[in-house]
């Protein structure tokens, strides 16, 4: 019988900040660092959770650091397991939030790239991780249920996608 290794992913958050009219989302265009695994792609904001914080505190901190704004209303939209997503094939477990209200004015850029308000209708045309196209509709739809997905990666490509909603 093959012994299974315990799942010990990198835990992170990924947030999508909505405009007041809910027609646009704040995204980062990762263009600042040539060694960036996300180079050229548009993405939500977020990053790795620190050991002394919960996922909501992590999301607030990441949004503060990357966009210079304070989240005042956040909704957990889902969780995603990304086996093999990391640069060296590390597994990731992400908590995906929609930020429905915030205080402050977002930065125009940060050390990873430029920030811009993108109409939701334009998302399908942007360069992004191919897997993002699968779960992004679940972030912005009107279904109040949280999704829980698995999206294995290999060589920077999503291999499959499945999810359940509770």
Image (spheres, rainbow, N blue to C red):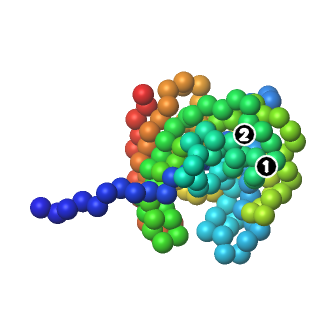
Choose the circle earlier in sequence order: 2 or 1: 2
Q: Is residue 104 above or below residue 91?
A: above
Kindly state the secondary structure of the residue where label 2 is placed.
Answer: strand
Q: Which mark is residue 67?
A: 1
Left or right of residue 35: residue 66: right
Q: Residue furthest front?
A: 52
Q: Residue at x 59, y 25 (%)?
A: 142
What's the distance in space between the residues labelled 2 and 1, CA to CA?
10 Å
Badge 1: residue crowd in 10 Å (few <14, some 14–19, many ≥20): many
Q: Position of residue 143 (x, y in %)?
A: 54, 25
Name the residue at 69% across, 42% down: 60
Q: Quadrant of residue 138?
A: top right
Is mark 2 in CB contact (under 8 Å) with mark 1? Answer: yes
Q: Residue at x 24, y 59 (%)?
A: 4
**89 to 82, vertically: above or below:** below
Mark 2 closeness class: few <14, some 14–19, many ≥20 residues within 10 Å: many
Evaluate whether residue 39 shows in this view. Answer: yes
Query: Could you tell me residue 163's position as x and y percent?
Result: 41, 40
Q: Secondary structure at mark 1?
A: helix
Image disc number at residue 17: 2
Q: Residue furthest bottom?
A: 35
Measuring from the top left, give residue 77's x and y in whole percent: 56, 34
């Amino acid at each position: 019988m093959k012994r299974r290794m315990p799942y010990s992913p990198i835990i992170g958050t990924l947030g999508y900040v909505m405009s007041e009219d809910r027609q646009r989302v704040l995204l980062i265009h990762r263009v600042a660092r040539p060694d960036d695994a996300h180079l050229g792609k548009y993405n939500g904001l977020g990053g790795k959770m620190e050991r002394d914080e919960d996922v909501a505190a992590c999301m607030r901190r990441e949004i503060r650091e990357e966009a210079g704004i304070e989240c005042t209303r956040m909704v957990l939209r889902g969780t995603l397991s990304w086996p093999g997503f990391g640069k060296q094939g590390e597994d990731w477990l992400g908590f995906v939030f929609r930020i429905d209200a915030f205080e402050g004015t977002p930065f125009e850029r940060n050390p990873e790239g430029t920030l811009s308000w993108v109409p939701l209708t334009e998302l399908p045309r942007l360069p992004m991780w191919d897997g993002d196209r699968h779960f992004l509709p679940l972030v912005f739809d009107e279904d109040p249920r949280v999704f829980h997905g698995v999206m294995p990666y290999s060589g920077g490509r999503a291999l499959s996608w499945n999810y359940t909603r509770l």
